[in-house]
Amino acid sequence: MTTPSPAPASRIVIAGGSGFVGQALATRFVGQGHDVVVLTRSARARTDGMREVAWNGRMLGDWATELDGAAVVINLTGKSINSRHTEKNRREIISSRVESVRAIAGAIAVGSAPPPVWVQASAVGIYGNAGDVLCDESAPHGHDFMADVCEQWEGAFREALTPASRGVVLRFGVVLGREGGALPMLARLARFGLGGTVGSGRQYISWIHRDDMVAVVQRAITSRMVGPYNACTHVPETNASFMKRLRKAVRRPWSPPAPAFAVKLGSYVIGAESSVALGGQRCVPRRLDEERFVFAHENLSESLKQLLS
Ligand SMILES: NC(=O)c1ccc[n+]([C@@H]2O[C@H](COP(=O)([O-])OP(=O)(O)OC[C@H]3O[C@@H](n4cnc5c(N)ncnc54)[C@H](OP(=O)(O)O)[C@@H]3O)[C@@H](O)[C@H]2O)c1
């Protein structure tokens, strides 16, 4: 089934839309003839049909007029979680998410025509480091830092939402694409012979192909979806299985495993966060099933082959 697009020539505002997920969405929406506005801290002129508008992700400004009369607002804003989780970075990881939600709510409050749909990013990290427990949207939330980030993010969204807008929270799994996110970096490591099993290898990776991610967002806009949805396939893979398939896709059938202490040391050296690779969630998209959403890509090996060819 093809996913219908929002009504013709609608204005779609994507906060934090300059990143990997946002650019995939913006490109699709521009191709469908929409007026796409990207809210970014470093706006520049573009020639590809998108408009970049400056904001700081925290305070009201001229950008707020873009939300007045928009058909949809999509908020993807947030400092990358794959930076070392120092106190300062932790504060910014949370504040960039919570404050952007509040800023959008403030902009909606001063306008006269609120967007009828607000799609808000979150992450499967809300379930914490959940081992092999299968997590649908009703699973208990975790108690680690990433779970706390997602709790505060979604909590701010629930508080900000008014009855004028239908709110959809998409708890993304790892989005696999050529242009950004985790895959290009993992593939580079694997090509250098560093694509071994990480830690115990038993931690799960819930994933979604970039094209399915775009289709889920489109469905969120055009359907009656409301509340939180796991945006990931039905086939989460253990890290050991994921890395094995990745090695095969880059034609490096064997690499030495990376024990937890080596991952911690390596992450420290490159300024990344080891807990992102050493933990995980085994999620399923129960509410997208109820929505009868059909994934185009659920075979990980084929997806990796296609994305890395
Ligand atoms: N990609 C994934 O696999 C994945 C998985 C689960 C959840 N998510 C979530 O989905 C959202 C989009 O993901 P993505 O991969 O597109 O992320 P991304 O490429 O890092 O883009 C996020 C955007 O947020 C803005 N931003 C970053 N730090 C900020 C700060 N301190 N204050 C205000 N704005 C800031 C940036 O825009 P400007 O610099 O232009 O202002 C950036 O383009 C993120 O919130 C992410 O946590 C992603």
Image: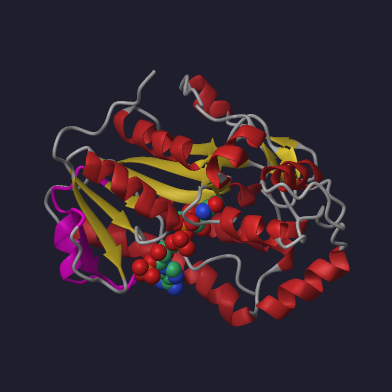
- Above or below 255: residue 211: above
Image quarter hosting the N terminus: top left
Image coordinates for residue 7, horizontal then vertical, percent:
18, 32
- Above or below 207: residue 3: above
What colouring does the structure picture have?
Answer: secondary structure
Q: Nearer the viewer, residue 159 or 256?
A: 256
Q: Residue at x 14, y 56 (%)?
A: 111
Q: Can the viewer see residue 102 in this picture?
A: yes
The answer to whether 38 appears left or right of 195 in the picture is: left
Image coordinates for residue 73, horizontal then vertical, percent:
28, 49
Task: Place residue 266 in its image quadrant.
Answer: bottom right
Query: Ligand 1 is located in which of the four quadrants?
Result: bottom left
Q: Can the viewer see residue 144 in this picture?
A: no
Q: Nearer the viewer, residue 91 or 177?
A: 177
- Number of marks in the rendered image: 0
The answer to whether 185 appears left or right of 155 in the picture is: right
Q: Residue at x 13, y 39 (%)?
A: 9
Image quarter hosting the C terminus: top right
- Which residues are drawn in magenta? 48-72
Q: Residue at x 30, y 49 (%)?
A: 26
Task: Place residue 63 in its image quadrant.
Answer: bottom left
Q: Residue at x 61, y 33 (%)?
A: 302
Q: Nearer the viewer, residue 241 or 229?
A: 241
Image coordinates for residue 267, horizontal then vertical, percent:
72, 72
The answer to whether 114 appears left or right of 223 in the picture is: left
Image coordinates for residue 150, horizontal then vertical, percent:
56, 55
Residue 246 falls inside the magenta stretch: no
